[in-house]
Each structure stands twice: as structure tokens, then as C-alpha cells.
Image: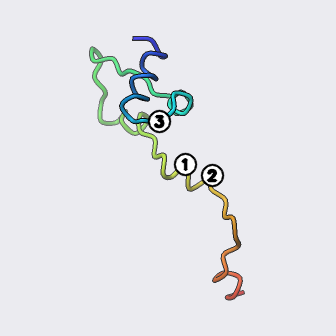
Amino acid sequence: MTQSQLNRAVSRATGEDCDLIDRRGFSLVDDESPVQEDDLEALIIDWDQIQAEQATAMFRDRQAHQAA
């Protein structure tokens, strides 16, 4: 399976745009060399954490402003 085929398959399964899937960097894992428990951390991406780190507020935090 090529990277393009994988991206299209994930796109169909999730309903997301192929470009978004490509940017997220999906890849196949080789079944012949199983992943060890210690290696799982390197394979897992917490997209909620990444989005939270990149997010910027549209409005100032009023509570923080009032407390100061």
C-alpha cells in the first residue's frame, strides 16, 4: 500500500480531507516486527494536547484581567 492509498483509506474511514490526513502523518506499522511497550509512546500523538498548545484565545481571559 502506498502512502497515497493509505491517506485515501483513512480519509474515507474518518470523513476528513486527504490533505489533513497527509499533514497528520499516518503510516503503516510492519506486522513482522512487533512494537514493544516501550516504543508505543513514540508512536502515539496526543492531537488534543497539540491543538491546545497551538490554540490562541480570541478574547482576553476576563477573570484573569479582573483578578490583576
Asked which colour scheme the image uses, the reply is rainbow
Q: Which residue is mark 3?
A: 16
Point out the image quarter for the C terminus: bottom right
Residue located 30% across and 35% down the image: 37
Q: Nearer the viewer, residue 68 or 42?
A: 68
Say which element carries label 2: helix
The image shows residue 56 at horizontal and vertical percentages of 67, 59
Residue 50: mark in rendering: 1
Amino acid tagged 3: Glu
Could you tell me which residue is drawn at 35 percent across and 21 percent down?
Answer: 29
Q: Is residue 64 above or below residue 47?
A: below
Which SS class for mark 3?
loop
Residue that mark 2 sits on: 54
Callout 2, which amino acid? Gln
Residue drawn at 45 percent across, 27 percent down? 26
**Of label 3 and label 1, which has the lower sequence position?**
3
Residue 33 screen position, x and y as percent: 30, 17
Pointers 2 and 3 in contact (CB under 8 A)? no
* Tag 3 near tag 1, CB within 8 Å: no
Is 27 situated left or right of 31 in this image? Answer: right
> Are the residues at dot 2 and dot 1 in contact (C-beta closer than 8 Å)?
yes
